[in-house]
Amino acid sequence: MTTPQLDSVQDVDLSRVHLIGIGGAGMSGVARILLARGKTVTGSDAKDSRTLLPLKAVGAKIAVGHASENLELSGELPTVVVTSFAAIPKDNPELVRAREEGIPVIRRSDLLGELMEGYTQVLIAGTHGKTSTTSMTVVAMQAAGMDPSFAIGGQLNKAGTNAHHGTGEVFVAEADESDASLLRYSPKIAVVTNVEPDHLDYFKSREAYFQVFDDFAGRIVPHGTLVVCLNDPHAAELGERAVRKGIKTVGYGTTDAVAAHPDVPAMATIVDTEVVAEGTRATIDLEGAQLSVVLQIPGDHMVLNGAAALLAGYLVGGDLPQLVEGLSDFSGVRRRFEYHGTVAEGEFAGASVYDDYAHHPTEVTAVLTAARERVTAAGKGRVIVAFQPHLYSRTMEFQQEFADALSLADAAVVLEIFGAREQPVDGVSSTIITDAMTIPAVYEPNFSAVPDRIAEVAGPDDIVLTMGAGSVTMLAPEILDRLDS
């Protein structure tokens, strides 16, 4: 795919903004903030979605389908057009019209950078866990009365939104590394949850992927702080390099991880965790204060994300007891171990259906491990997964890792690869994963047949997970209906 040439953001007029792909998680968030600031917002998306209606309700003019005349939805041409670097092709008619009219075209990350100017910027980066950690940080700060502005790549379950124009001095956002757009920001606090090679279709090498995080650390403003997870080897190494460069750096992690990386000053140490009925109870030592947090979302990775959120809130002046209270009240983000329901009676009584965005082997491992902890604590049930691989390049790169990760379940139904922006590759299908798995696994290329395949392997009290970054999320309610019928 060819991507458009983009303009400088210097002196861009944000009075009338047109967003191509306005229904996306990132675009819809910046649209909300623009509208809250009194700007004129127009946009287009390839298809209708539940994201568009609330945007229209607060004043956005939106067209379904891409056409050159969409630039005139407000009655006059926009002052700037915003596009996604990866998703929108160069020949998009709205981009072509913008060029013809001499209208500046910028990336969503450039727009977000402009919106964050003048705020204390808290940016959450990492290969995995950005959305959950950003969401936890926001909820904790809200409980501390800070009312931060925020832009998240997912919808907060409790607030029902992915962005907000707050009254406070802090702006919290995800820093996306997939196309190096995180280098647009100038954070006061930069959190790196983990660093593991991904998006190699863009970066071409592991070394280039690692380097973008070093460059990101170099963009921290004077008197700012880099926060790294010491449980992740590459994030810890990033922290060690930053310390040597004179960048103020602190770490968080379990007791063993903190001991293994003495060169990075540990600020938050996870002393103990326990799986309880409400979720996971964690004891965190933050500069000598022993904090007890009960997280409703299961998994050791969520405890680490919670520690990062606590640190971020604390470093910008949040009250610790209130931050802890907010974390304990965090009910999750849409598509992150999102609960859909439990079968009440019949053959599958007690089986619960969840949906998760996990689309990298490490994420799959974390989610299935958390699900395993739940059934172990309950003393009954198994873990069943319906997984849809995302991108041909990622599937080929990590085929064995996906097979190993999915084998942590008791049984799996694997859908065909969701190509997204990529074209199919001859001879490549999801069988390159299922053929290497060590548990009962079914390759099911027929999307509509998946609920029946799940019913063939599921049983009472099982945890059933739909998993992947593509259309598999649509199957969670269908599977619940099938098991409940």
Image: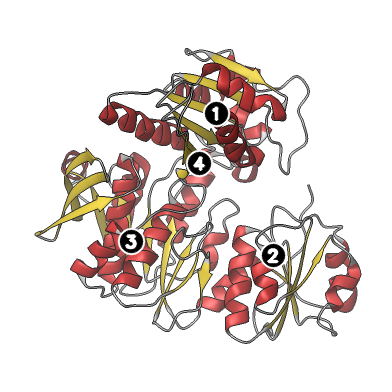
Neighbours of disc 4 within 10 Å: few (<14), some (14-19), many (20+): many
Q: Mark 1 or mark 3, which has the lower sequence index?
A: 3
Residue depth check, mark 3 versus mark 2: number of the one nearer the observer: 2
Cα distance in 3D space between marks 3 and 2: 36 Å
Question: Do tag 2 and tag 1 residues touch (Cβ < 8 Å)?
Answer: no
- Work out whether residue 8 can be spotted: no
Cα distance in 3D space between marks 4 and 3: 29 Å
The numbered mark at residue 483 is 1
Q: Position of residue 354 (x, y in %)?
A: 48, 39
Q: Pointer 4: what residue?
A: 356
Left or right position of 19 against 26: right
Mark 1 secondary-structure assignment = helix
Mark 2 secondary-structure assignment = helix
Q: Mark 4 or mark 2, which has the lower sequence index?
A: 2
**Front-most of 323 and 159?**
159
Q: Mark 2 or mark 1, which has the lower sequence index?
A: 2
Which residue type carries mark 4? Asp
Question: Do tag 4 and tag 2 residues touch (Cβ < 8 Å)?
Answer: no
Q: Mark 3 or mark 2, which has the lower sequence index?
A: 2
Q: In which quarter of the image is the C terminus?
A: top right
Q: Pointer 2: what residue?
A: 52
Q: Position of residue 313 (x, y in %)?
A: 30, 67
Q: Pointer 3: what residue?
A: 226
Cα distance in 3D space between marks 1 and 3: 47 Å
Which residue type carries mark 2? Leu
